[in-house]
Image (cartoon, coloured by chain):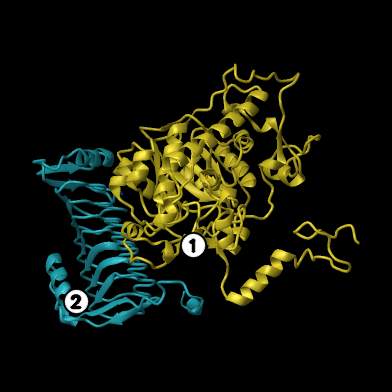
Amino acid sequence: MADDSRSFPSGGEAPWGGRESWTFDQPTISYIQRAATTGIYDIRGGGAKRRVPHFDDLLLLGASVSRYPLEGYRERCDTNVALGTRFAKKPIELKIPVTIAGMSFGALSAHAKEALGRGASQAGTSTTTGDGGMTDEERKASKMLVYQLLPSRYGLNPDDLRRADAIEVVIGQGAKPGGGGMLLGQKISDRVAAMRNLPKGIDQRSACRHPDWTGPDDLTIKIQEIREITDWEKPIYVKVGATRTRYDVALAVKAGADVVVVDGMQGGTAATQDVFIEHVGIPTLAAVRLAVEALQELDMHRKVQLIVSGGIRTGADVAKALALGADAVSIGTAAMVALGDNSPHLVDEYRKLGTAPGYYDDWQEGRDPAGISTQDPELEKRLDPVLGGRRIANYLQVLTLECQTLARACGKTHVHNLEPDDLVALTIEAAAMAGVPLAGTGWIPGRS
Amino acid sequence: MNTIDLSKTPVRELNQRLHDLTPDTNERLWRITNLKGEHALAVGLTVPIEVEIDGHVGYYCAGMNKEAKVVITGHCGVGVAENIMSGEVRVKGNASQAAAASGHGGLVVIEGDASARCGISMKGVDIVVGGSVGHMSAFMGQSGSLVVCGDAGQSLGDSIYEARLYVQGSVESLGSDCIEKEMTPHHLAKLERLLSRAGIEADPRRFRRYGSARRLYSFHVDQAEQY
C-alpha cells in the first residue's frame, strides 16, 4: 500500500486495491451525491470547517533569562479593557477581554439569549443583540449590551439604541462577508414575526447591504447620525467580515468608529450556504495582523479598539490574539457549545436528527435538542437560563484564567502587554499570516 | 416659537436641545435656519413638537423620528426620515435616495420627487410622494404603504413582502415577485385616506395597486431563477 493512502474514517484500513482519492474524498463524494439528489445547495450553521492556519499554529515564548515571569496566583495580571474611548462619552469598561458576539433572538431562543446575558454579566463583560432586535429579557439580563444595527433593520428601534450600552454597525460577518442572512420559516414564531414585522412562518431574508448608505463616506455620515441620536454617549463599533481587512479597518476608522470588530472565516452563522462559509473570507489569524497594521499606520492602535472573533475557543486563543494586537476577542460558537450545544448527553436526540454530538450544525432548522438554536417552546424549556448563564460565566472565567496564566508566563502585568515578540509560528503559513518568526528561526516569510 | 440659527448653533447642540424636551413641554414650535446642507438635523426626536427646517438639508434629516412633526421646506439628502417610528415628516422639495428607509410607522410626505429606493425595507410607514420615485423603490418592503402620484422607476417593489404600493402614473418595470393587484373598494378607501392625510390632491381612482405575488416567501429551488 502506498505511503500516502489513508485509513477509512471509521479507523479501519482501506481494502486491497482501495485508495481514497484526495480530490474526490468521502466528503466530496457525499457532497456531489447530495447535490444530485436535492438540486439545492447545503445550508447550515457554524463557521468554516476546513483546516486553516489558526492560533494553534502559534506558540508563546515564556520568560527565562532575557525576560522574567510573574508568579501565578500571586502577582497581578490585569485583564480589564475599555472600549469606545475615542469619541463616546460613556465607554464600556469590561473586566475581561472576552465578549459575547452578536447572535439574534430568532436564530437563538429567548432562554439562550438570556443565559448569554446572565453569563456575560457575571463575568463582567458585554453581550450583543443580533438581527431581529433587542428583547426585554436580554436587556434585563445583560449589564452591558451592545445593540447591532444591521442591514435588515429588523426590530430597529431608537428607544433600544438609547437603552443600549454600545452600538455595533454590522457590515458583514466572517462566515459570509458580502452575504445577507436567512431565517427559515420554521423558526419564525409569533414573537419573532412580530418583532420583525413579517408574516409568521415565511423565510426571512436579511439584506446584505444597508438600505440607506453605501461606501465609507456615507458610513461616516451614518455614524454621525447615530451619535446625534444617542447624544454622543455610546461607543459605536463597526463590524466587518474578514476579507480586505487592511482597507476595511482603515475606512472604518476614517468613518469615525470607536471600535472595529473583525470576524474571521471561522466565525459562525445561524444559516448560510456551506459553499459561502467555506470559500469566502480569510482566516482570523491572517485578519488580526492586517487589522492591527491598519490601525498602526493611522496611529490609532489602542485608540480605536480592535475586537477579533472567529474561532476563539481557549485562553490560548485569547492570549495569542491579544499578543498580535487585539484589544479584546469575541465568542459566538464557543458560547453556544458552553450553553450545551452538541452535548454528548443528547446523543439519542442527535441520532434522531441523523447526526451526532460534535457534528450538529443544522442550526437553521429550529430543531436543536439543546434548546439553543430553536423557537420551539418545548425545546427551549430544556435550556435553563440561570444554569446556562452559570455555564457561560464558568467558561469565560476559564478563558480569562488561561489567558492570565500565559501572560504571566511571559512576564506581563496586563494581558494587553502581550506582544508579537512573544510569539513564534509552527508553520510557514502561520508565520507569514501572523507576521511572527517561524519557531527556531528569525524568519518571517514575506517580511525578512 | 424657538428659532435655532445653525450659523451660530452647532448641530450637536440643536439635537441635544430637542432631545432634552419632555413630552409635556410648552416649547412645541421650533424653526431651524441657515442649514447649509447639514446632516442629521432633528434626528431621534421623541416628543410631539413641530419643527420647521427652513431650507435644504443633508443626509438623514429627521431620522428615527417619533411623535414629532418635521417639515423641510427645501430639498433633502439621502435617507430623510429613515427608520421613522411615528409622527410625520414632510418634504416640500425633492428627496434623495432611500427616503423613509426601513420606516416602522408614521407618515412621510414628499411633495416633489423622490429618488431611488424610496421606502426601501419599509416596515409599516406610510409614504406619499407627490411626484415620481426612482428605481428599486419599496425594495423588500415589509408593510405600510407607498403612494406615488407620478411615475415609478425600474424594479418597483422588488422582493416585496406585504407593503402596499399605489402608483398613478407609469411603472417602468416591476421587481421580482411584485405584481399588479386588484384595486378593491377597501384599498380605494385606504388610498383616499392616505392622500387626504398627506394633503395631496389626486383622484384615487386613477391609481393602480401593486403588491407581492408571495411566490418567494419560502425558498424553493424551482423558483431559483426568480431571485
- Point 71% across, 44% down: residue: A430
Instruction: Pick whichever, A400 or A147, lies toward us.
Output: A400
**Position of residue A276 measured from the top left corner of the image (x, y, whole percent):** 58, 62
Report the front residue among A438 and B152: A438
Which residue is located at x 61 percent, y 35 percent? A315
Question: Is B207 rendered above or below residue A343?
Answer: below
**For the residue marked with disc 1, what is the amino acid?**
Glu
Q: Secondary structure at mark 1?
A: helix
Q: Which mark is residue A437?
A: none
Q: Which chain is yellow?
A: A
Q: CA distance from mark 2 to mark 1?
A: 37 Å
Give how far across and how far down residue B151 sits, in percent.
27, 76
Q: Say which element carries label 2.
A: helix
Q: Position of residue B215 (x, y in %)?
A: 40, 77
A372 relative to B49 in the view: left or right: right
As drawn, the chain in cyan is B
Q: Mark 1 and mark 2 in contact (Cβ < 8 Å)?
A: no
Camera-side residue of A289 and A119: A119
Residue B149 in sight here: yes
Please name the residue shown 14% across and 49% down the image: B48
Q: Amino acid at mark 2?
A: His
Chain to which the residue tagged by mark 1 belongs: A
Residue A14 location in percent, x, y? Answer: 83, 63
Q: Quadrant of residue B200?
A: bottom left
Quadrant of the image for the N terminus of chain A?
Answer: bottom right
Tell me the residue that label 1 is attached to. Answer: A365
State which chain disc 2 sits on: B
Tag 2 residue: B187
